[in-house]
Amino acid sequence: MKVAAFDYELPVERIAQEPAADREASRLLVVRPDALEHAGLEHRRIAELAELIPAGALIVVNDTRVVPARLLGTKADSGGKVEIFLVRKVEERSVTVSEGVERVGEVWSALGRSSKPLRFGTDVLVGPPGEASPGVVATAARLVIRLLGRTEDGLLEVALFTAPSDTLAAALATVGQVPLPPYIKRAPTESDAERYQTVFARVDGAVAAPTAGLHLTRALLGRLAIRGCEMATVTLHVGLGTFQPVTVEDLDEHPMHGEMYSVSRTTSEAIARARERGAPVIAVGTTVVRALESAADPDHPGLVSPQSGETHLLIQPGYTFRVVDRLLTNFHLPKSTLLAMVCAFAGTERVLAAYRAAVEAEYRFFSYGDAMLLERDVHGESAGPP
């Protein structure tokens, strides 16, 4: 499908630069199945979500946790400034850090920039001032990044090391910065460390937040539980590819980025119970949609198989949804794969009409913005199982 079909006009002042005063204060645009322009739209608040969700529904969230992926350091040999942005963990492996010395480090793909070209085989030091030699960490707060080479897709390959008495998670928490999206035109603050993380974040690995989940509070989850709603989790580590611009005219030609995901047996069984009681499966965010649809059981429509792996699933109008019935999601960038997914889910004309209404009503867009609640289009371009 032509990428131009997913375009809309967005004034720059509608891009949220700060989160709402509190998570439940965000606005919520409810898009009914017959919505067109202003008809069939309800302007509500996230705080009202419990009364908008059918009693007994299954709500699926993404429990990925954002790592402090932006690292500012200096070259060990020259002192030159370097910025490293971690993209995705690849593996743990032994790396030669000096002649005859090997250490096991976490290997990541990353982006990097400095005033002069980065040289492979050298180290970048991140943290407070102190003496350090290649491969040796001076303090628990210091991180050593060994520049290994290039990945097949042109990113940097780096290995991360800390002191033997430290953990990488602790070091990153000390010296890393919150990886705010590029359309947030400010430096991260201390409050971002809490607000750019969901309250159910558990599994380290994302470099961007599953933003629909940012609206939920433990109190709201409690109100949903009182209504008999069941909660389940998937893990999908949101990658930098979520911000990757679509540069082709036809979405079929877009090289879809891969993201690691995992759907547990517990979640698979929760979905089966929801089907048995006739309750809808509600995805909190497009990342949950991508994980569940990637794990859809081809032999049993509406169910999923427990599995883990890397998904390259690209969802656009014409896709047959097999698992998800309703979707809570933020507003997405024009001409993006995420907007294409939402259009596939609820109908392109309906979704773009809702976006126009949201712009007119001064909703806040993107990661720290407001949200919308949609039902799957079961009669039009995205018809799936009942």
Image (tube, rainbow, N blue to C red):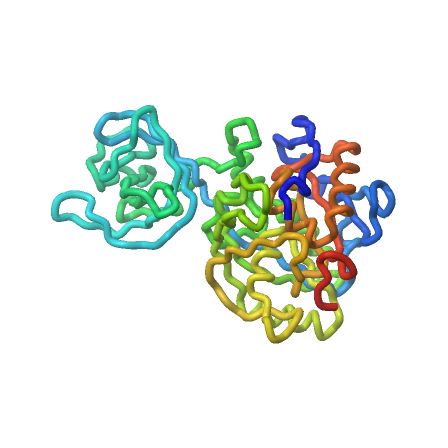
Residue at point 55%, 45% (across, down): 209
Residue at point 55%, 27% (across, down): 185
Q: Nearer the viewer, residue 343 or 279?
A: 343
From where the camera sits, is residue 65 visible? no
**Residue 145 is drawn in which quadrant?**
top left
Residue 347 in the image, given as x and y percentages of width and height? 74, 51
Q: Is residue 57 left or right of residue 121?
A: right
Residue 179 in the image, given as x and y percentages of width and height? 49, 37
Furthest-right residue in this view: 39
Residue at point 41%, 38% (across, down): 85
Q: Is residue 308 left or right of residue 350?
A: left
Of the 4 image quadrants, the one containing the C terminus is bottom right
From where the camera sits, is residue 99 visible? yes
Residue 368 in the image, given as x and y percentages of width and height? 63, 37
Residue 146 in the image, given as x and y percentages of width and height? 27, 41
Q: Is residue 353 left or right of residue 235?
A: right
Q: Is residue 150 left or right of residue 282?
A: left
**Residue 380 is drawn in which quadrant?**
bottom right
Furthest-left residue in this view: 100
Q: Nearer the viewer, residue 323 or 273?
A: 323
